[in-house]
Image (tube, rainbow, N blue to C red):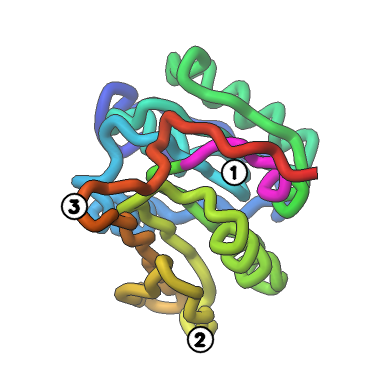
Amino acid sequence: MRVITGSARGRKLKALPGRDTRPTTDKVKESIFNIVQFDVEGRRVLDLFAGTGQLGIEALSRGAERCTFVELNRAAAALVRENVDHCGFALRAEVVQSDAAAYLTGCGEKFGLVLLDPPYASPLLERSLELISKIDIVAGNGIIVCESAAERELPQLDAPYEKGREYRYGKIKLTVYRRRACQDHTGKDVTAHEDSHLPRQL
């Protein structure tokens, strides 16, 4: 498992032994970043089910401003920190050991790119999408990319979120959501930007 391109290109990343984490294949990872290739540089990224951290690290390698990695498993979170340090991104990364729902509920940031790759058999993907849209943590014109089993049909979300294209790769499917920017009567974007902070919800 390696970083595909960017400043950390070729760096090897460690994975946990066993099947507690399921790293995204290089083919699917490359497809994800082909989809969002013009929407990574300078953005704040959320890698919500980080696993090994490879998706967020790939985003940092390609010029993302910062990445927050959220991982519940203690050993996996420690591995993410190790992989981040190995690639030289410690100053642009935050690793949070937390349940995804708990993190989203208390989240005080806006992200330009959200990466969701929870265990395929769990209901975490739908629950996370619902929370993300309800709390509205995605910046205007931001993107959510979901990885799931190919047969899984993901829900529509309430405006300003829009379900976009789906991409199938054998037994795996990528689904893209976008958040429209809100404009006032002058046409100015009034959506909170990525550098803004939301009040923490209790």
Q: Are marks 2 and 1 in contact (CB under 8 Å)?
A: no
Q: Is residue 168 above or below residue 3?
A: below
Which quadrant of the view contains residue 75? top right
The residue under the point 35% across, 50% down is 140
Pointer 2 residue:
151
- Badge 3 amino acid: Thr
Q: Is residue 58 visible?
A: no
The residue under the point 73% across, 44% down is 201
Pointer 1 residue:
50
Q: Is residue 71 left or right of residue 74?
A: left
Mark 2 or mark 1: whose residue is earlier in sequence? 1
Which quadrant of the view contains residue 2? top left
- Badge 2 amino acid: Glu
Q: Is residue 94 above or below residue 160?
A: above
Q: Position of residue 12 (x, y in %)?
A: 44, 29
Q: Secondary structure at mark 2?
A: loop
Pointer 3 residue:
186
Q: Are marks 3 and 2 in contact (CB under 8 Å)?
A: no
Q: Secondary structure at mark 1?
A: loop
Q: Secondary structure at mark 3?
A: loop
Spatial separation of the CA atoms under disc 3 and disc 2: 43 Å
Task: Specify the segment rendered in magenta.
Answer: 103-110
Q: Are marks 3 and 1 in contact (CB under 8 Å)?
A: no
Q: Position of residue 60 (x, y in %)?
A: 38, 30
Which quadrant of the view contains residue 164? bottom left
Mark 3 or mark 2: whose residue is earlier in sequence? 2
* Quadrant in which the N terminus appears: top left
Q: Is residue 171 above or below residue 100?
A: below
